[in-house]
């Protein structure tokens, strides 16, 4: 592990699956203290989902509702390493130039199609790691138009775009991790 390599500067989101989005939101809002920013209504080809702010620009929880989803029916349990509700991870980069650099590296390893696509307020590049875990690398989409939201979408937090921008433009000026021996 030698030279500094351009890479993500944060985790933008963790995507999980639930059978009941309203129950999930109630728990994470009322018990854990997260804040729902926006709920996207279901449309053909896309599930109903909510985006919850984990606070202070630290990241987001992206929750997809799949009617009838039952982890136990899929052979999953509450035992560690058998939970299986994680759908994918999303990492943050500060800008499109960095996203493009990572796209080129992912293409070189056949880990991505290389398509960068707009997803609401973010630009997203999908990839698969060597074990098949799906991931995204994201940055803020400066061309996002909030008027493009659909009739079934619900803005819960009026500051949701600024909160998303904070997560998706993680401070790339943070000092790089110190090189050295971990004891």
Image (tube, grey):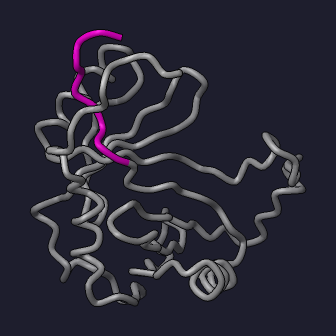
Is 62 left or right of 55, judged from the image as shown?
Answer: right
Residue 177 is inside the magenta segment: no
Q: Position of residue 129 (x, y in %)?
A: 50, 27
Instruction: Identify the residue shown where x is 52% and y is 38%.
Output: 134
Q: Quadrant of residue 136?
A: top left
Front position in the image: 31 or 122: 31
Is 16 left or right of 128, judged from the image as shown?
Answer: right
Instruction: Identify the residue shown where x is 69% and y is 84%.
Output: 23
Magenta: main secondary structure equals: loop
Q: Position of residue 51 (x, y in %)?
A: 45, 72
In the figure, 149 relative to 165: above or below? below
Q: Quadrant of residue 28?
A: bottom right
Instruction: Identify the residue shown where x is 42% and y is 87%.
Output: 152
In the figure, 79 relative to 133: above or below? below
The N terminus appears in which quarter of the rendering? top left
Please identify the residue farthest to the front as the structure is shown.
183
Q: Position of residue 56 (x, y in %)?
A: 34, 69
Front position in the image: 81 or 73: 81
Please identify the residue farthest to the top as the structure is shown.
2
Q: What are the residue bounds of the magenta stretch?
A: 1-10
């Amino acid at each position: 592990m030698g030279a500094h390599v351009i890479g993500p500067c944060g985790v933008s989101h963790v995507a999980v699956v639930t059978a009941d989005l309203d129950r999930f939101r109630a728990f994470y809002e009322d018990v854990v203290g997260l804040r729902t920013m926006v709920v996207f209504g279901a449309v053909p080809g896309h599930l109903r989902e909510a985006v919850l702010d984990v606070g202070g620009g630290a990241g987001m929880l992206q929750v997809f509702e799949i009617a009838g989803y039952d982890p136990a029916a899929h052979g999953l349990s509450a035992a560690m390493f058998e939970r299986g509700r994680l759908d994918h991870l999303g990492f943050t980069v500060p800008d499109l130039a960095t996203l493009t650099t990572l796209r080129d590296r992912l293409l070189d390893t056949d880990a991505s199609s290389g398509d960068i696509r707009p997803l609401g307020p973010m630009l997203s590049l999908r990839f698969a790691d060597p074990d098949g875990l799906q991931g995204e690398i994201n940055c803020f989409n400066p061309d996002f138009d909030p008027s493009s939201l659909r009739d079934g979408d619900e803005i819960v937090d009026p500051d949701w775009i600024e909160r998303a921008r904070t997560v998706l433009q993680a401070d790339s000026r943070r000092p790089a991790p110190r090189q050295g021996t971990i004891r």
